[in-house]
Amino acid sequence: MTHHSHRVLATLPVLSCLWFPIFAPAQTYPSKPIRVFVTVPAGGAADVVARMAGPKMADALGQPLLIENSAGQFGTIAATRVAHSAADGHTLMFTTPSSQILAHFTIKEVPYTIADHTPVTAAVETVSALVVHPSMPARNVREFVDYAKRNPGKVNYGAGAAGSVFHLMMESFMAATDTSLFHVPYKGVIDAVNATVSGDVQTTMSSISNIRTHVASGKLRALGVLEGKRFGPMGDIPTIGESVPGFEKPQSWFGLFGPANLPPTITQRLYVEMSAALKSPDIRPRLEAAGMDVIANTPEEFSAQIRRGFITYGAVAKRAGLKPQ
């Protein structure tokens, strides 16, 4: 045996040690419970989705999913924790565009960038609607726009803080209809809905899941659905686009993320299991009934969707004169 071949053989064990960890995660993942930070309060629509899909994913993965609510500051508290977690798939986040897109237009120093998280899948897109207090004379979107134009600045709407999803959706609506409505900021979406029910404000935009019972009981009147198509279970409510050409709803997904550099095997495994859970016959109908469209797109599709979101929300934020605080 030559001196050279001895050297080659001597390096082999080292190489095999280097190769092994690259393949290890797929076999050993998950090796302990998975923590999932949800960036909305308990009972919020995204929380409901996470808790619906969680047990099914846990069964498939063989480890429990520990869901923890970490709301506030546009979801940046949870997003920062996950960004600083080990990229082993045992710390994840279920969030909205607030932490991944909007925070970058509303908060001066966000402690992470778009590159600090690995997108896994956009689970669902929430179906949303424009609703008014029943005392409002408007019976449909066209009448609402006419009323707002006759009373500039006198129509108050409830939404989260400046730069929140529904604040920017209302800004998109005002831009498309050439109206001026007055923003009354609330802590969150549920508070804005309750303020509309009580008549403290005249109107709000919200996910169907948050307003459906109020619409059914007559405490709120739904004028239009924000999506491009009508919502099956409430098919009598037209889309806003039917009477406002050019109105396009900015995206409002709920999505699963890991830290940056999540191994592709783990990213793929989480995508497959979440997708299967969402599409299962006992979950999908419940989500759709609650006003949520299952997307379950691939990590690559989700990444592209987030990049598009930056462009659309960026334009709306600029038009709204939003300055990072």
Image (spheres, rainbow, N blue to C red):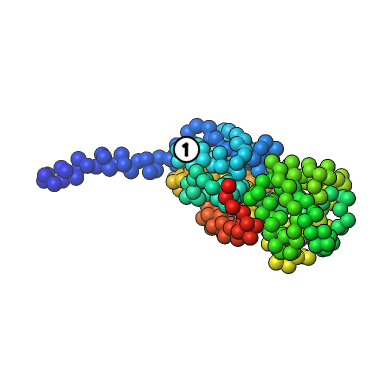
Q: Residue at x 87, y 50 (%)?
A: 134
The single residue placed furthest to the left in the displayed view is: 2
Tell me the kind of residue under disc 1. Answer: Ser
Q: Residue at x 61, y 54 (%)?
A: 322
Q: Residue 200: tell me if it is visible.
A: yes
Q: Quadrant of residue 175?
A: bottom right
The single residue placed furthest to the bottom in the displayed view is: 245
Q: Is 175 or 300 nearer to us in this picture?
A: 175
Q: Is residue 15 left or right of residue 63?
A: left
Quick one: quadrant of the N terminus? top left
Q: Is residue 137 left or right of residue 83?
A: right
* SS at mark 1 in the image: loop
Q: Residue at x 83, y 45 (%)?
A: 199
**Crowding near the residue tagged with mark 1, few <14, some 14–19, many ≥20 C-alpha atoms within 10 Å:** some
Q: Residue 285: tell me if it is visible.
A: no
- Residue 319, position as x, y percentages in the image: 63, 60
- Is residue 294 positioned above or below 141 on the image? above
Which residue is tagged 1? Answer: 85
- Residue 268, position as x, y percentages in the image: 50, 48
Q: Residue at x 56, y 57 (%)?
A: 310
